[in-house]
Image (cartoon, rainbow, N blue to C red):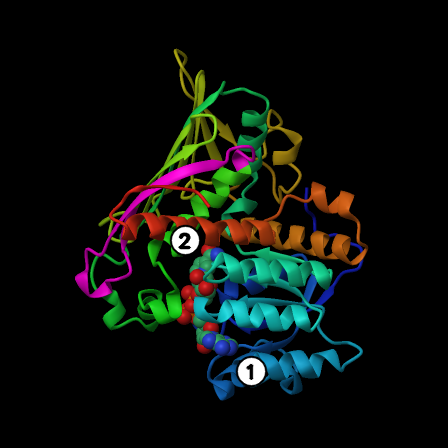
Amino acid sequence: MIDGTLLPGCPIAWGMVGGGHNSQIGHVHRSAALRDHNFRLVAGAFDIDAARGRRFGEQLGVDVQRCYADYRAMFEAEAGRPDGIRAVSIATPNNTHFEICKAALLSGLHVVCEKPLCFTTAEAKELLELSLARNRMVGVAYGYAGHPLIAQAREMIARGELGDIRIVQMQFSHGFHSEAVEQSSPAARWRMDPAFAGPSYVLGDIGTHPLYLSQVMLPGLKIERLMCSRQSFVSSRAPLEDNAFTLMQYQGGAMGYLWACAVNSGSMHGHKLRVIGARASLEWWDEHPNQLRHEVQGQPAQVLDRGMGYLHPAALQEDRISAGHAEGLFEAWSNLYHRFALAMEATDRRDREALQTILHPDIHAGIEGVRWVENCVRSADAGGIWVDYC
Ligand code: NAD
């Protein structure tokens, strides 16, 4: 159970790039990092507009001297302070992640970066090399992975409770962009502009979330080849897609399917995973994250609830309140930042063994997301053909 006990070496002096006033995800990062007091927000370059960012930083209680005009100024000034930041979170539009992440690593900072980590696997590998050379941790904000029942699914699958895995069905399929909302929403507009969003819209923006959850649940499953078809139902979004279907063949013969969609009219998140084995299936839905359906062929379906003693210990260690109470996205993200704090400490100690035991979306998860999008786009843009996964 997490009860607010400070982790060794914490609080970690922490800064943010982006996540300014009214940004979609900035407050989620702050509330997650600050929840257990393992991080202390002491600096920031919160906004593309320096004056607005400074005002916002002050409102957050950050010393005005440490509300910087841009990330370069922040990294340079903080490196010169005895109490300077040790870690930074990057919550800016996609096109900036690579440069900011690289600059942070070169300044000796641990990094939590929003997804996608960058645009190409070549860039992602450069960040990996740098993080290794500088011995710094890079975490990626796959926040849903912090829901305890994801760990339960991973344990049940590992123990063979479903039998051999045959099918993995994934979707993140919402309806919020069924119309051209980008005409009035700047946060939607950049997501559909390749200069800011990168080579994809829904594949990278939402598809990588269930993809990462599938990798947590099924660490042994490797994609052998895939086939992707992508469309822009709101035609002004072309060449970026607002809908994509991806079929995956895994090594060993299992099949996967991922539907990423922003035009699923009437749907809220529609973010679900169903893992189907030869004997039984598991199903998790992010709108009901405290429940995991377990369906054994020929038996009545069971619903497993978060916090209950019948769950695997790995699914209980991050509970914050007893069973029956609803935990949600804020708790999942707090769990993730708890793991990031542990991983930063283990990295500082060069404790590779401890690092292995902290299940967190690290730079390899970031690389995998970028790689998957690259392969999907390659398949889709060649006419929706099967491509070997590379
Ligand atoms: P947004 O447009 O709502 O906010 C972006 C913020 O970054 C703004 O405050 C803007 O002023 C600031 N900014 C832009 N460029 C900057 C720069 N160079 N320096 C400093 N600040 C800068 O965007 P958002 O929806 O919050 O998305 C931000 C990132 O988070 C994106 O990469 C997106 O994919 C990701 N995201 C992830 C999740 C998740 O579940 N992990 C959810 C939403 C968004």
Give percent across and percent down for residue 190: 35, 70
Residue picked out by circle 1: 70
Q: Residue at x 58, y 50 (%)?
A: 364
| Numbered circles on residues, count | 2
Secondary structure of residue under mark 1: loop
Query: Percent from the top left, x then y, of residue 270?
Result: 34, 44
The relative height of residue 219 versus residue 52 in the rendered view (above or below) is: above
Query: With 261 as the anchor, is 38 left or right in this view?
Result: right
Q: Is residue 337 above or below residue 13?
A: above
Q: Is ligand 1 within 8 Å of the beta carbon of the residue shown at mark 1?
A: yes
Q: Quadrant of the N terminus?
A: top right
Residue 140 position in % (x across, y down): 56, 56
The correct choice, above or below, for 227 with respect to 29 in the image is above
The question of residue 318 being in magenta is answered with no
Q: Amino acid at mark 1?
A: Asp
Mark 2 = which residue? 374
Q: Label for residue 197?
A: none
Q: Is residue 364 above or below residue 22?
A: above
345 left or right, relative to 206: right
**Nearer to the camera, 53 or 255:** 255
In percent of width and height, residue 58 lies at 58, 82
Q: Measure the C-alpha gap from mark 2 to mark 1.
A: 30 Å
User: For the magenta stretch, what is the residue range?
Assistant: 217-244
